[in-house]
Image (tube, rainbow, N blue to C red):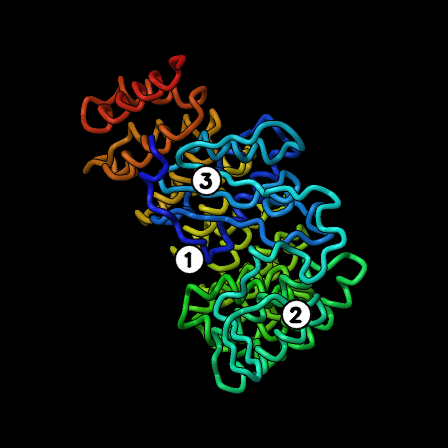
Amino acid sequence: MDRDHYPRPTVSPKPSFERAFSNIIDHLRTKPDGDAKTQRLVRALCERISSDGVVTEAGIERESTLDEPGLAGRMHLRHIETITVHQGAPVSELLELARALAADEGPIPVTDKVQVSFVVDVTPGELVGLSGPFWPAEDYEIPLVMGFDQDDDRAPRAADGPADEQRRLARAIKESERTGSWTEALHAAQALTHLAARTPSTNRRLMAIAGRRIISQSLMRAFIDHARSLPEERTRVVEVLDGVGRDATELVFDALSETESIGPKAFLCDLAARLPDAYAMAQALLKSPDWHHVRLGADLLARGGEPEAADALAAQTDHPDPRVRQAVMAALGRLETPKTVELLVPGLDDPEVAVRVAAAAGLGGRSTRGATMALARALEREREPTARTAMIEALGAIGSYEAAALLSTVATTPRTMLKRHGYLLDQRLAAVAALAGCPARSAERALKRVASGDRGEVGAVARRALEQHASEAQPA
């Protein structure tokens, strides 16, 4: 199939896709053969692919990026420039690419719906002795940045060297800030960030420090406000603030916590979680008397992924505001620590439905017997349809033999006038759908039980799922 058949995705402003892909890669580096957790992580990745698809860029390669865990570090190590994932990309293709990125060598798969472009290598010594910029002149371009020369020559031009280029960009930023031309100022600030990364390592630190001094606090605030109304500029703003580092931390946290609704500032969340001092500031938010500050702190701790975050979140599991408890359960569900299960289980008994749903979702995919049995007990006493469905889906995400057996019981136990503890039709169908997504070994016996035990719609769906499993098992 011609790859041009698919629409060209825009570069995603959602860091959550990169985070989900990083989680899979990091897990496969410790367990290359995969397990139930691998399947859960792949499903989480698929949920983050927008209708337009996603393009992930490796970004600027700095001295430390080759040793970084996650997607960006592996892309740099394997000399990958971009990864393009179209909507509907098969799980098998995403998993194959994740396995390749988790390895230090070997082929990188490229398909119609999962495409990869590679960095063009420069021959060592090719740039030695050249004057001017440290990159080919024909590739040099600063979009929308004007020269502001005295002769009013508005066209971008090559500089005499990094120091001269930095001075020119500083003048462009200052003039754009004076006139309120935030797009031009932002593009110049991004070019300044690129300049520091392209400077030889002997001078890179000094160049980066000088560049950060040029980008003031008031300018960063203006960039954040600018990105609220222009979503296409959000990726660029995040890159500039990330380059500024510690000086941007407090500013970003203030921007996120100034109102109850994060709204169009949500693009800053992943950045806030990885900036210097982010963990300490997120912990401070957890102690705030304002419920939305506590919710934000919980979310940022989860995004940071630090194992000790579970202890900080544990203190808020009994918060009086159900909105906070829901956020804490959702945050715990994103942490991969042994203690997480014991903190999530009490949430299944919370008086608020939304909290029980979040706790169930957080237990989904955790292949511990404690999670399966806790969901089984909660499902027996649960009467709210929304929470019941969430628990059924969580059992499907676990996918163990015990979980599959429980789901088959749900699917074959209809609710009737005499059997009030049975399950509604949509819940029974959800159980079959969950079984269909389980690994074939654990699901087949359970699906056969449903197919033979129900002659109605539920049994028919189970039989179709068995046929699908059988066709997928056939050799290509």
Q: State the image quarter where residue 76 is shown.
A: top right
Give above or below for 292 relative to 63: below
Where in the figure is residue 388, as x and y percent of width and height?
A: 35, 44
Residue 424 showing in the rendered view: yes
- Amino acid type at image mark 2: Glu
> Residue at position x 34%, y 48% from top?
51
Residue that carries the numbered disc 1 in the rendered image: 351
Q: Distance between the Cα atoms at labels 3 and 2?
A: 61 Å
Q: Distance between the Cα atoms at labels 1 and 2?
A: 61 Å
Between 252 and 108, the residue placed more toward the observer is 108
Q: State the image quarter where residue 129 is shown.
A: bottom right
Between 373 and 24, the residue placed more toward the observer is 24
Instruction: Kindly state the secondary structure of the residue where label 1 is placed.
Output: loop
Sequence-wise first label, 3 or 1? 1
Where in the figure is residue 125, as x and y percent of width and height?
A: 75, 45
**Dot in front, 3 or 2:** 2
Where in the figure is residue 44, as x and y percent of width and height?
A: 46, 43
Q: Considering the image in quadrants, where does the N terminus appear?
A: top left
- Amino acid type at image mark 1: Pro
Residue that carries the numbered disc 3 in the rendered image: 375
Between 187 and 216, the residue placed more toward the observer is 187
> Residue at position x 38%, y 13% from top?
474
Q: Are marks 3 and 2 in contact (CB under 8 Å)?
A: no
Q: Which mark is residue 165?
A: 2
Q: State the image quarter where residue 201 is shown.
A: bottom right
Q: Are marks 1 and 2 in contact (CB under 8 Å)?
A: no
Query: How many C-alpha atoms fall within 10 Å of the one at disc 2: few (<14), some, or many (≥20)?
Result: some
Sequence-wise first label, 3 or 2? 2
Q: Distance between the Cα atoms at labels 3 and 1?
A: 16 Å
Where in the figure is residue 260, as x and y percent of width and height?
A: 45, 73
- Amino acid type at image mark 3: Leu
**Dot in front, 1 or 2:** 2
